[in-house]
Amino acid sequence: MLTDKEKADLDKLIAIGREQAGKLNSMLIVNYYLSLPSAMQTEEVHSEITGYLEEAGIEIVNDGVEVDSVGDGFGIAEIRPFDPSKIDIDMKTMELSSLIKRIRYSEIDLDTAFQRRGGLWTPQQKSQLIESLILRIPIPAFYFDGGVADKWLIIDGLQRITTLKEFAVDETLRLTGMEFFKDLEGARFSDLPRTFIRRIEESNIIAFIVKSGTPGNVKYNIFKRINTGGLQLSPQEIRHALYQGRATELCRRLARLNCFQKATCGSIRDDRMADQEFVLRYIAVCYYGRDKYGGVPDNYLNDAMEYLNSDACADAREIEVQFTRVMKAASDIWGRYAFRKLGLDLARRPINKAIYEIWCWEFFTRTDQELEMMRKQKERLFKKFQALCQNSEFLSAIRASDRKSFMIRYMMTDEMLEEVLNADKDKGKKL
């Protein structure tokens, strides 16, 4: 339970939030939460903090995106269980020339979606990597997903790979800011003496190759834990890298539809693929199946990506038609409040992942006639759902990620919606 001291601290955060249009970044809240004694870092305290801020009309947003975290402890990474015996990684000592050849023949995947991650180093940082190779200073190990023999995927080492490509393959990088070899300022790869080129090419490196037999969810965990780039990849960015194919193409296409942008009020940014994750959540719930949810959101969404790439997947055109239908219903019925918790103060809160999934499911499974009834009864539906959002059991269910809570939130929404629809049907009978 929060003491007066913690509440006083939260009051200060509330004051800060009110100076920023009633919003606080989730990272600020994360750091406050982690500053509490370890005994207080519990789900109950987490819920009490969010509730305290919410009652004060404060929205918690992620990196400026109007999305409410659900069941993930303000975005704090959870341990994802998997069987360590299924990890199959091969360690190779190889000459750098082998890696350069793979780059030259496009046998290492430098996916365009991540090219911006390859430009985090300055020309001086890149040049000093080359200088280290000339000086025969060992460089850190590389990690690759070797599931496809002629298309290794970079798990860790993108900045170094990009530097090698720019210097030794494309020759677009000219050395600058050298510490020991100042005479090489401005030199390209082909300008170097053969002795220095040989030193670079014959440098020994260590490469860890995740082999093809490693299951997708295990690869995801390895990728998530090992990736140490200057800007950490989001979960959906990792999925985008691991599950290339129809899954990535469909998520990208649906996220760009006007109906999705309208339903979400354009509040889900696309620079970290948060928009594509929301599309995937729709597909997971409505097509892959709610019954497949086992209590670990990452595993569920990873499996949904595999489903999209499989022969069992529904027709992509049919998915798009239904997605458009669902998003249009959300806009018509909820307007600017679509996919958000409804408070008594009528303040517009962030989009909530659990509520988004709930209404995607409800609109997807309802007939056109039922959707039309909801449109006619949207004021009544608004009040009913507003009341449901004050229910402590429902609030607990949308904040947790376990399977029981997952099913409870659907059950409670379904019961509420049935009351609205049946009232409209009874009214029609009397007339």
Image (cartoon, helix red, strand yellow):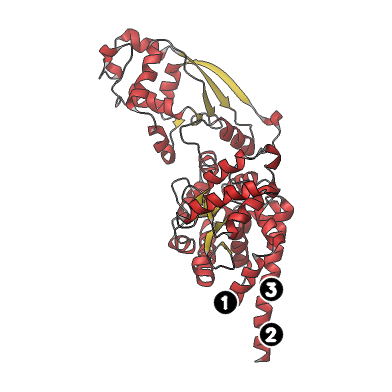
How many circles with numbers are drawn on the protein? 3
Pinpoint residue 301: horizontal percent, then vertical percent. 61, 47
Secondary element under disc 1, as helix, strand or loop, is helix
Q: Decide if residue 316 is on the left or right side of residue 78.
A: left
Q: Nearer the viewer, mark 1 or mark 2?
A: 1
- Disc 2 crowd rating (10 Å Cα; few below 14, some 14-19, many 20+) is few
| Earlier sequence position, callout 2 versus callout 3 | 3
The relative height of residue 78 versus residue 328 in the rendered view (above or below) is above
Which comes before the other along the chain, label 1 or label 2? 1
C-alpha span from label 1 to label 2: 17 Å
Residue type of the residue flagged with mark 3 = Glu
Residue corresponding to mark 3: 418
- Element carrying mark 3: helix
Instruction: Mark 3: give few (<14), some (14-19) or many (20+) Cα within 10 Å.
Output: few
Inspect the image, locate mark 1, and give the three-letter code of the amino acid beneath it: Glu
- Residue 401 falls left or right of residue 110: right
At x 65% / y 87%, what residue is drawn? 428
**x 51%, y 44%: residue:** 245
- Amino acid type, residue under disc 2 in the picture: Asp
Marking on residue 379: 1
Q: Which residue position holds label 2?
A: 426
Q: Residue at x 45, y 19 (%)?
A: 98
Q: Is residue 77 visible?
A: no
Expressed as whole percent of the image width and height from the top left, the position of residue 324 reads 50, 64
Of all residues, the one furthest to the right in this rendering is: 404
Query: Which numbered disc, 3 or 1, marks the residue that appears first in the sequence?
Result: 1
Q: In the rendered view, would you say 203 is above or below 345?
A: above
Residue 63 visible somewhere in the drawing: yes
The answer to whether 23 appears left or right of 406 in the picture is left
Within 10 Å of disc 1 (Cα), the crowding (few <14, some 14-19, many 20+) is few
